[in-house]
Image (cartoon, helix red, strand yellow):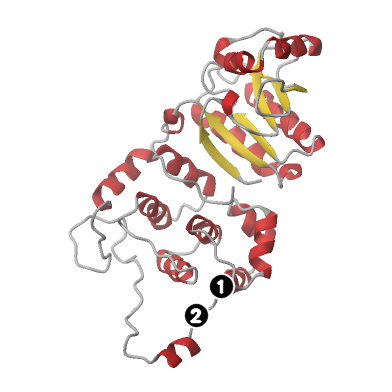
Amino acid sequence: MPLKFVCADIASVSADAIVSPCSPHPIITESLNGSIYRTAGDVLLAARKEIGALPFGHSAVSPAFGLCAQYVIHVAVPLWQGGIYEEINTLRHCYETIFLHASRLALTTLAIPLLGYGTQGFPYEIARNVFFDALINTKDIQDIQIYLVSAQSHLLERSENWQDISDYVSCLFSPTNHIDPSAPTNTPRINESAAVYRPQSSYDRDLTSLLSNREKSFSAALLTYIKERGLKEPTVYKKANIDRKLFSKIKTNPNYQPTKATALAFAIALELTLSETNEFLRTAGYTLTYSSKFDIIIEYFILKQIYDIFTINEALFAFGEPSLGSF
């Protein structure tokens, strides 16, 4: 169940199924599904009329017609009325029925907007939390790639933490000059004692010595960390936003070379400290650097001991950086 944040018109996203928020009655509501109906054509509205009335919280499936998908999952999203009419539970039921359809249809990819947020009036944090709770607690969608689609990049800029991250990035980011984190600096840091790891020079040793004492491979280091922490493998790859097939490749191939995003995703899932993260990255040939906004944002969350990968990916998305995990 890897999750990827996508900034696009959902009608243009290619997926096995696209979720179309709708009213209980078969009408086009510009703010909810107008672009989907314009792209799919009049046949989609005809299919929606065949479905008939949908109670709030319920969903139904139709062909996708002119969309880059096989199916459209129509879901009747409630209006926010202060939470006094069980709107949160109804919104949660929206996701439950959507994911049930996704499982029954054996989807591999699903594009979905953040239901309730926007015209329907749900506060962002409530809409967000309902989505993530449903995502984490639904077992039947573990092998489905989920795309959380927003037409506006500022959708995910509502968190109060974004300004803190922006300040941190502004202090440390150097796009043209690599900053050695071990060098003296007056730049403020969250934790002065958590210096980025730098391997000591080994040029004084001969090649034979270096090769005989080479480090573990990334795969071996990952499995060692999992064992030492007493964790279950499925728990780790799910927390890392990694699909089961990729984890299996890593586990069975001692020479597997991950992307930096994949390596960092596992570091987050294992809740490694900053020095442990850099040690772990070294096994894959990477390190954290202040010439990369991506790296600085990851460092920020590690120093804050925030290891929720969805929260981290929200921040990365808000800053225009790639997500952690496998896609």
Q: Nearer the viewer's eye, disc 2 or disc 1?
A: 2
The amino acid type of the residue labelled 2 equals Glu
Q: Give the vertical position of 26 relative to 129 (above or below).
A: above
Distance, label 2 to label 1, CA atoms, is 9 Å
**Label 2 Cα neighbours within 10 Å, binned few <14 / some 14-19 / many ≥20:** few
User: Residue at coordinates 74% horizontally, 45% vertically from top-left?
Assistant: 139
Instruction: Give percent across and percent down for residue 19.
Output: 66, 26
The answer to which of 102 and 161 lies nearer the viewer is 102
Name the residue tied to disc 2: 215
Residue 86 visible, this angle: no
The answer to whether mark 2 and mark 1 are in CB contact below 8 A is yes
Label 1: which secondary element:
helix
Instruction: Give percent across and percent down for residue 194.
Output: 34, 65
Q: How many discs appear?
A: 2
Q: Give the vertical position of 257 relative to 49 (above or below).
A: below
Instruction: Give percent across and percent down for residue 12.
Output: 57, 26
Residue 192 visible, this angle: yes
Q: Which comes before the other along the chain, label 2 or label 1?
A: 2
User: Residue at coordinates 68% horizontally, 69% vertically from top-left?
Assistant: 252
The answer to which of 41 and 305 lies nearer the viewer is 41
The answer to which of 221 and 95 lies nearer the viewer is 221
Instruction: Give percent across and percent down for residue 102.
Output: 75, 35
Among the 4 quarters of the image, the one containing residue 258: bottom right
Label 2: which secondary element:
loop
User: Residue at coordinates 56% horizontally, 11% vertically from top-left?
Assistant: 30
Name the residue tied to disc 1: 221
